[in-house]
Amino acid sequence: MRRSCRRRSSRRRARSSRARRVHRPRPRVQERIAQALATRTRDEWTAVFEGSDACVTPVLGLAEAPLDAHNVARGAFAQSGGAWQSQCAPRFVDYGGESA
């Protein structure tokens, strides 16, 4: 009985140590990915993945982010004093229920 308990605990330790490992891409693989991405512009890559179910979205600059359709729909930015400011998230909605 004690042996099985020891085996289980050693398995648990092995699993937890594997879970803590950080995956680091190999330099050659990283270079090949960078070379492939450099073949097109950001807008070209966006067009390639448009309409697909791939989880791909462009990294927007600070001037572009407030004008993005997704951010506009969410109300993620507001203009204050002529400058764009990000809104806090999450925003809680009051549905007119009882207040605490």
Image: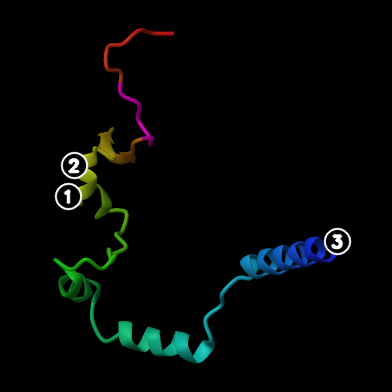
Crowd tier of the residue under label 2, counting other residues whose Cα lies within 10 Å: few below 14, some 14–19, many 20 or above = few
Q: Quadrant of residue 34?
A: bottom left
Residue 76, percent across and down?
Answer: 28, 40
Query: Which corner quadrant holds the N terminus?
Result: bottom right
Residue 2 is labelled as 3
23, above or below 97, in the image: below
Tell me: 49 left or right of 18: left
- What stretch of residues is rendered in magenta? 88-93
Q: Amino acid at mark 3?
A: Arg
Q: Is residue 92 magenta?
A: yes
Q: Is residue 43 magenta?
A: no
Q: How many marks?
A: 3
Q: Quadrant of residue 62?
A: bottom left
* Pointer 1 residue: 69
Nearer mark to the viewer, of 3 and 2: 3
Q: Quadrant of residue 36?
A: bottom left
Residue 75, percent across and down?
Answer: 24, 37
- Are the residues at dot 2 and dot 1 in contact (C-beta closer than 8 Å)? yes
